[in-house]
Image (cartoon, rainbow, N blue to C red):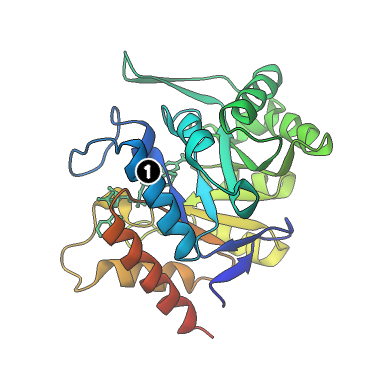
């Protein structure tokens, strides 16, 4: 499978590796193994330029990632060259360090309008519900329908949910375009969602491919192993890998390309 590939039947073409942007917007309430400093504007601009030069066209953000959306709105050049994924439903309060959730259709519209402003754009490529874990209940309360209405109105190109359960992931694919699921060397429980996507030509984005930085120590090259396993699974569209380290970004793209070419 090539490095650039279709994201299900959304009509979007994405790089097999996308850039996750939690660490450019927020340093509280995160579970990374090491502390870090949020990079300054120059470092973020350089990272975005490096990602584009390496062939990445997919970027993942969310209102819950602190200043991430607003910083991308300021610093992302050539917006039309990027596929932007953002989310609705979770808000992170930096003072208390806690998240709160609102999945009501009215809030969905408000949140999408705010994301459009913050990201300095008139359309969003993918908007996913940022689930609190109650995937089925969220779908039943009409949140995905509200996103699908915004898609009909032309504000969004594809809809879905970042899920935490297999049944929620499958229901998301049946009612929307994309599920974002956790998949890594230590967590393969959600593979049935990926198989459902492969059968029904739906989109799959992978989160936490490197176990949020808790890479297995007993494996010689856990980054390559992770990428080989995930990109070797039919149905996977792209891995959203978080990094603010230019050397890691370069390594990850080289190894993702290797994982893709091994399957051609
Ligand atoms: P991840 O991509 O599995 O891991 C990111 C961590 O791995 C970072 O701390 C990064 O540190 C480290 N890393 C990256 N490349 C590395 C390499 N080559 N060698 C060693 N360490 C490396 O996990 P994540 O950040 O939790 O998730 C990725 C993205 O998915 C997020 O940024 C976000 O966009 C999305 N996400 C979504 C949800 C959701 O509910 N929707 C939840 C979690 C994440 P350095 O910065 O030092 O490289």
The number of discs equals 1
- Residue on which the image places disc 1: 44
The response on whether ligand 1 sits within 8 Å of label 1 is no
Q: Which residue is the extreme one toward the right?
A: 152
Q: Say which of 151 and 172 sits in front.
A: 151
Residue 92 picture location, percent across and down: 42, 22
Tell me: residue 24, above or below residue 141.
below
- Which quadrant of the figure has residue 248? bottom left
Tell me: residue 17, above or below residue 107.
below
Quarter occupied by the C terminus: bottom right
Q: Residue at x 53, y 34 (%)?
A: 73
Q: Say which of 100 and 250 sits in front.
A: 250
Is residue 189 in view? no
Pointer 1 local density, CA inside 10 Å: few below 14, some 14–19, many at least 20: some
Does 108 sit left or right of 249 as displayed?
right
Is residue 237 in view? yes
Q: Residue at x 83, y 38 (%)?
A: 152
Tell me: residue 27, above or below residue 33.
above
Does 244 sit left or right of 193 as displayed?
left
Q: Which residue is the extreme one toward the top?
A: 95
Q: Say which of 49 and 249 sits in front.
A: 49
Quarter occupied by the N terminus: bottom right
Residue 210 picture location, percent across and down: 32, 56
Residue 57 picture location, percent across and down: 55, 57
Q: Say which of 47 and 205 sits in front.
A: 47
Residue 65 picture location, percent across and down: 42, 32
Does 35 sit left or right of 13 as displayed?
left
- Secondary structure under tag 1 reads helix
């Amino acid at each position: 499978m090539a490095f650039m590939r279709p994201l299900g039947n959304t009509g979007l073409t994405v790089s097999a590796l996308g850039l996750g942007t939690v660490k450019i917007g927020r340093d509280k309430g995160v579970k990374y193994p090491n502390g870090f400093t949020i990079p300054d504007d120059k470092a973020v601009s350089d990272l975005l330029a490096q990602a584009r030069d390496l062939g990445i066209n997919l970027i993942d953000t969310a209102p819950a990632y602190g200043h991430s959306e607003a910083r991308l709105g300021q610093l992302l050049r050539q917006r039309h060259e990027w596929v932007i994924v953002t989310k609705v439903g979770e808000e992170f309060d930096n003072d208390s360090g806690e998240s709160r959730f609102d999945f009501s259709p009215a809030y969905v519209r408000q949140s999408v309008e705010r994301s459009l402003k913050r990201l300095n754009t008139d359309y969003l490529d993918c908007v996913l519900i940022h689930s609190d874990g109650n995937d089925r209940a969220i779908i039943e309360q009409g949140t995905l329908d509200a996103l699908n209405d915004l898609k009909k109105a032309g504000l969004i190109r594809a809809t879905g949910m970042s899920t935490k359960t297999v049944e929620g992931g499958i229901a998301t694919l049946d009612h929307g375009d994309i599920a974002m699921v956790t998949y890594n060397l230590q967590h393969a429980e959600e593979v049935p969602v990926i198989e459902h996507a492969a059968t029904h030509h739906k989109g799959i984005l992978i989160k936490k491919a490197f176990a949020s930085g808790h890479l297995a120590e007993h494996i010689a090259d856990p980054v390559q192993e992770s990428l080989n396993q995930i990109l070797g699974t039919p149905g996977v569209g792209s891995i959203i890998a978080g990094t603010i380290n230019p050397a890691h970004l370069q390594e990850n793209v080289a190894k993702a390309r290797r994982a893709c070419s091994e399957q051609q």
